[in-house]
Amino acid sequence: MLYHLLYPLHTELSVLNVVQYITVRTAAASLTAFLLALLLGPRLIRLLRAFQIGQVIRGDGPQSHQAKEGTPTMGGLLILGAAVTPTLLWANLLNPYVWTAVLATLAFGLIGFIDDYLKVTRGSHHGLRPLHKAALQSVVGAAVGIGLIVLTQQGLYSTQLVFPFFEGLSLELGWLYVPFAMFVLVAASNAVNLTDGLDGLAIGVFTVAAVAFTALAYVAGHAVIAEYLLLLRFPPAGELSVFCGALVGAGLGFLWYNSYPADIIMGDVGSLALGGALGTVALLIKQELLLPIVGAVFVIETLSVIIQVGSFKLTGQRVFKMAPLHHHFELIGWSEPKVISRFMILAIIFAMFSLTTLKLR
């Protein structure tokens, strides 16, 4: 809204001309989101405590986690509010990419909210049934996929699947892009959800990935850079930098209160929304196949669960002491802060590598 209010005034006040630049509005959105999260965090924590909305800890997890019982949860509401508000303030609201990303993020957040609500009211770590949760996620994924088909028909998008590392190699999916989008979004949202098991882990890794996607979104919408890097260019995609910047600011603000030992936990309303946001941005900027590299820590955590479950069902043996992988390292003696720090280092390395792949074609 501020973009639409301020920029028309640049003819009378020349300093407002900077509002047209995506980089300026991205920085403004990031700072606004950080300040919102920082200022509203204590109030939300007090409110959640007043309503006794606390985390229920699974009994079969690491015993050190039992002390976290009752920690205010559903902190994802803070992330969503701190990210969406600056996006609406600083982004071009006539841009369909922005609305696609915002609405998809809120839809996944709503699914997570329902899941968290059921957990709190039941006093259990079980919320939505896995099948029901997957079905709701698939519906949102299908809606995003169909929306992208509509944008393609309007010449604003392409259902081509572009392969990293290979110059000119792509695959036209057409309507098959809908189930592909469903898979990407369901996988991304669940991957972040599985990683959310230690204080500051999921939000820290997510924020690193969001920084990478801020740069990737800007590149995707920049004529000169996109042509130089041989990328598919869609001018509307650049506006997603503002959305991603807001996610970075909100993530850092939430990390202020979620860092070890956490004062608040994001819950599924946060983890599902953030995973959906990453997946949606990856689709919109045509970096679908780069997403597993940017979010490699999320992928590794998910694979550890798949391997653990598959091995136990097939052989009756467990590969890890506990899955997801961060719990395995806790049980072999790593302290929680050490696990978090080392996973964050990996996240930064993978994010940096993902950016270098843009020129490896």
Image (cartoon, grey):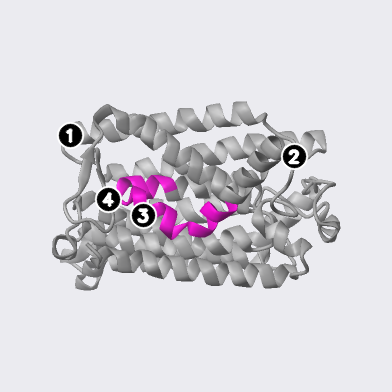
- In the rendered view, would you say 70 is above or below 13? above
Residue sitting at 70 percent across and 71 percent down? Answer: 337
Q: Please tell me whether mark 2 sits on a helix, a strand or a loop.
A: loop
Quickly name the residue at label 1: 154
Type of amino acid at the residue the image marks with label 4: Phe
Q: Please tell me whether mark 3 sits on a helix, a strand or a loop.
A: helix
Cβ–Cβ under 8 Å for marks 3 and 1: no
> Horizontal placement of 304 versus 23: left or right?
right
> Mark 2 or mark 1, which has the lower sequence index?
1
Residue sitting at 67 percent across and 41 percent down? Answer: 309
Quickly name the residue at label 3: 290
Quickly name the residue at label 4: 163
- Magenta stretch in the rendered image: 279-301
Q: Nearer the viewer, mark 3 or mark 1?
A: 3
Gap between marks 2 and 3 measured at Cα: 35 Å
Type of amino acid at the residue the image marks with label 2: Gly
> Mark 3 or mark 1, which has the lower sequence index?
1
Q: Measured from the top left, where is residue 230 in percent x and y?
A: 17, 59
Quickly name the residue at label 2: 316
Gap between marks 4 and 2 measured at Cα: 38 Å
Gap between marks 2 and 1 measured at Cα: 53 Å
Q: How dense is the environment of label 1, judged by Cα within 10 Å: few (below 14), some, or many (20 and up)?
A: few
> Mark 4 or mark 3, which has the lower sequence index?
4
